Image (spheres, rainbow, N blue to C red):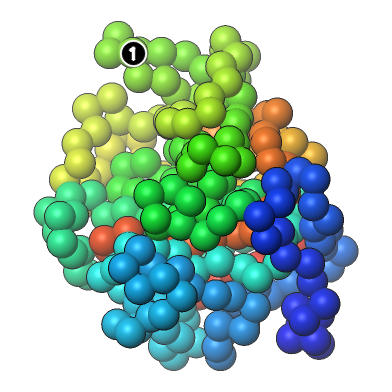
Amino acid sequence: MLRRTFLALPSLAALPAAEAEAIRPTRRVRLFNGRNLDGWYTWLKEHRAEDPNQVFRVVNGQLRISGVDWGGIATKAAFRDYRLITEWRWGGPAHGNRAQAARDSGILVHASGEDGAYGGIWLESIEAQIIEGGAGDFIVVSGGKVNPSLTCEVRKDAKGETYWHKGGEPMTRTRGRFNWYGRDPEWKDVLGFRGKQDLEKPMGQWNRQEVVCHGDTITILVNGTVVNMGAQAYPSAGKIQIQSEGAEIWFRRIDLYPA
């Protein structure tokens, strides 16, 4: 049934997602069925629509993303007004210029425009970050055509770093990061980093990360705790893309529910 549904789902192509028709889930949609990558397509910086190194594979009912090549796996369909529930864990290796850096990936929502618009790698989007010590950060991923944007209530620390703070000063960004509320101010881009308030579980254990998109608001939860919230999101609909960014990461669940 899901496969037949995907055949009829609209694609954003090069249109801004906010002005394209997108699916509002009315029931659970299993974006990842545990058997194959139906409903998804891959895009890699070096190989574009090909995946010669099998960066994205289904292994024992789980999606393995090796991180060897930079790029992403994206839904063929566009969505709006949903609760995305993922369950992920880090694998072992990190690669290339990030071999000794914090393990890194991310979930891009409202992903729109041309494949590889950002640096030849990712769709323009709003990222729910997955990185050691920073799971739950927002990053506005802009490639200069769709020009996504997001507004968050924030506080700044003594170093000028910006953190989500409910009731804080509204700030709008068209690129760059809003840290989750508890990101360690002494965060370092080193393999295995752990912050004092991190909600992410230790290496190898499963994490539950949710991204709730309702109208033009986006809320991120990590292991049941709200860690970041944004409003006035543009676009407010789009594809969903998961990054390959130098680290092995596994997903055993990628589901949509009505928001």
Quarter of the N terminus within the rendering: bottom right
Q: From where the camera sits, is residue 38 visible?
A: yes
Q: Is residue 215 left or right of residue 246?
A: right
The extreme right residue here reads 26
At label 1, which amino acid type do we have?
Gly
Above or below residue 126? Residue 171 is: above
Work out whether 91 lies above or below 126: below
Quarter of the figure with residue 217? top right
46 displayed left or right of 57: left
Residue 60 pos. (x, y %) = 44, 90
Residue 104's spot in the image, x, y percent?
32, 53
Return the residue nearer the eye: 63 or 121.
Answer: 121
Q: Position of residue 203 (x, y in %)?
A: 28, 61
Please state which of residues 130 and 89 is positioned toward the viewer in this rendering: 130
For label 1, the SS is: loop
Q: At 57% from the left edge and 10% from the top edge, which residue is drawn?
A: 169
Q: Is residue 90 visible?
A: no
The structure residue drawn at horizontal position 15% and vertical position 55%, both measured from the top left corner, is 97
Which residue is located at x 67 percent, y 34 percent?
Answer: 233
Q: What residue did someone put label 1 on? A: 160
Question: Residue 114, image x and y in percent?
Answer: 56, 56
Asked whether, in this view, residue 193 is left or right of residue 210, the answer is left
Q: Where 56 falls versus 23 (above or below)?
A: below
- Graded by Cα atoms within 10 Å as few (under 14), some (14 to 19) or many (20 or more), the crowding at tag 1 reads few
Residue at the spot 60% in from the left edge and 14% down from the top edge: 170
- Vertical side of 199 occupied by 7: above or below: below
How many callouts does the rendering have? Answer: 1
